[in-house]
Image (cartoon, rainbow, N blue to C red):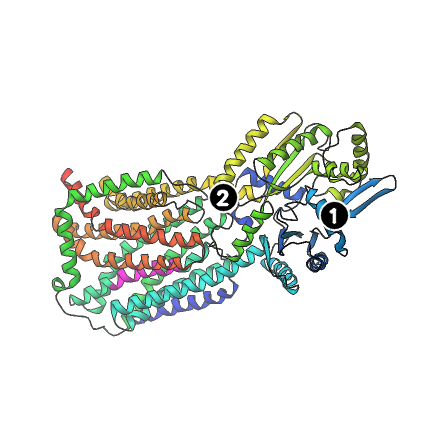
Amino acid sequence: MFKKAARGVLIVVFSITAALSIFLKDLRFNYVFEDFFPVGDPDLEYYREFRTKFENDNNYLLIGLENSPSIFDAEFLSKVDSLTRDLQAMEEMNSVISITNSKRPIISQAGFYQLPYLHVSDPTRYEQDSAVIYQSPLLKETLVSADGRSLAILLKHKDVITKEGSDEISDAVVSLITSYAFPNYHIAGKVHAQQIFIGKLQTELFTFLSASIVLIVLFLSIAYRNWWGVVIPLGVVLMSVIWIMGIMGLTGKQLDFIMVLLPTIMFVVGMSDVVHIMTKYIEQLRLGFHKINAIKTTFREVGLATFLTSLTTSVGFLTLLTASIRPIQGFGLFTAIGVFIAFIVAFTLLPFSLLLLPRPRVSKKLVHRSKWFKILSYSFLKVLKKAPHVLLANLVIVLISLYGISLIRINTFLIEDLPNDDPLKQDFVFFDQNFGGSRPFEITAKAKKGTVLTPEIIHEIENLSEYLSDSLMAGNIVGPHTLVKSLNQAVNGGRSAAFVLPASNYEKRQVQKNLSRLLKRNDAIAYVVTDDQKTGRISMRVGDIGSAISLRRTKELQRYIRHNTDTSLVSFKITGTSNLIDKNNEYLAENMFEGLGIAFGVVALIAGLLFRSFRMILITLIPNVIPLITVAGIMGLFGITLKLSTSIVFTIAFGIAVDDTIHFTSKLKLELDKGKSLLYALKSTYLSTGKAIVVTSIILSGGFLTLILSSFGGTFYTGLLISLTLFLALIIDLSLLPVLVMYFSKRKQKMLN
């Protein structure tokens, strides 16, 4: 009867696995930049409005080309000119700007015409051309570097939504550049970076899966020393991964740089369930119980505790739904679902497989003679004898950690997750050092009187532009004021010195007259001024200086705007993708504490319902809060910044670390319910659960430690910090937790009633 039911359950499990595995082919990798904008932020809505009026400020690519000793070399410039023309011919490009196609406008009595800044085919004019180029504010350190050894080409491409479309643009651009055999080139921009990031994600997913499988096989081989002790547990975790990833493929959830952590988490969480089941099952067999009775006892004594640990772990992940960033929300939701999938698969596949298999051979040696028994007995006695020292040591650790927490800084860089020697990071640094930056920065100007092209408002924009250049260190600033200055330059014969706002009445009349003509050609100013001329766009690029400095400078900029602009004429507002990414950091600490608060509350509720004791709530929480405080302190003391990736460490670690505490306290309650004294029940619990707690903590820590194989700094620190937290939680569970139980029992005679 039991075997028939077992076969039926296994058929259902394998059928579900087969069905969900079909959807694995639908899994897609993605790194959509816009997904990391803060959800519900009013600035996000404003940016969307800005994007409909102008363009997506991230639809660009920067190409940097180097040549020694100078870019003013006939062969080099001829290749640059040909590359520029080929890029212009691409259907996906809206515009391509380089020094080989840049022209200065001339307006004279003969009409309007343009002169090239650079006469590519006439090297005899290079010296004169270079002098003109370096006198032009629009070109110097925008299209040519200050040292004259590199130039930049700015590409603005059409808006692309799909990864395939982005990859096509990136591949085509790279293919064109390499076809000209430039000795040294650099590329920066969303579509290029996105393609490289996704490639790394695919590689790392395979790496993490492989490392997790190797780790599990190695551990299981050492722990159980037989084929079923390796194959069945490995099947449990593999099936759990297939289920959750199949669900992701079915629902269209894509893999991003946070979601690639999911398989590793599934492996370690699934193994935690497996170890508790296997340890209890083998323990019952050693005590001489029949196989069916051993499985029943395992279900009864481990089932509830494992369900509660799965619940608390899921809650830890579900608290990530409070985050303001969609990828983190999705990660929290699917990982929470995955944790319960691991629980379901573990308590169906494993017990029923064991039921169908022959009774395994287990050692008949007495439990009290085993090495584990001796080590745990010695540890238990030492902990109780040194109870005051244990309490004092934890207090000192907390105080030092609190000081470390005061040193934590919230900061992130656009591409800081990559190592310094990564080619993509070096490309971004190249543009930051030579061409004013690689990050777009946007400001809108809304006219309250007239249009943004009226002289009074243009002067306000010009003053703001000077501040942006000096204080924000922005480069390539383009706006309505540059349009007016370009016209003034044009009516003054194209002289670089005339690239200023018109001063004389004659210049003002000439500029105004030609501006009216230009306004009739809306396509010429569509990226700078809206059709109704009420809103202007001030666009620039800034260096990847980190969100902490960037946010500080942004606040200083807002203060400058409030106190130094005529708000009765014009209102300025900061927008753009960089501003939104920076704002994420303002939410990090808030999201983290909110998530932890919810997790603490749910765990406290579970402990309260289970034990009906306020003291047990504290006993459950304290051993798991201290490791979090300690790791946070370590972050501060060692200068590990809090950022998007590391902000999820604490909620994940708490949700997983509390599992061992719940296993310990659940077993303690069972022992006390048998009528045993507190000391005897505590010792029995310590010896019974100690091995499983140690083994699962080693597995969990080791599993997360595989993440240090990542080339992404955030993933590296996520794995390292979670592993460290779980290791500290293990030490505290085997030292502070029993001391707290004894300490509270001395304060109150009745406990755990």
User: On screen, 378 above or below 293?
Assistant: above
Find disc 1 in the rendering and name its residue.
128
Q: Nearer the viewer, mark 1 or mark 2?
A: 1
Q: Residue at x 33, y 62 (%)?
A: 346
Find disc 2 in the rendering and name its residue.
546
Residue 736, x across and y down, in percent: 21, 46
Q: Quadrant of residue 278?
A: bottom left
Relative depth, front residue between 90 and 482: 482
Q: Amino acid at mark 1?
A: Gln
Tell me the crowding category of disc 2: few under 14, some 14 to 19, or many 20 or more residues within 10 angstroms, Cα based: some
Q: Main secondary structure of the magenta part?
A: helix
Question: SS of the residue at dot 1?
Answer: helix
Quadrant of image for the N terminus: bottom left
Residue 13, x across and y down, in percent: 38, 66
Stretch in magenta = 264-278
Of labels 1 and 2, earlier in sequence is 1
Relative depth, front residue between 222 and 404: 404
Residue 282, x across and y down, in percent: 21, 66
Residue 681 in view in this figure: no
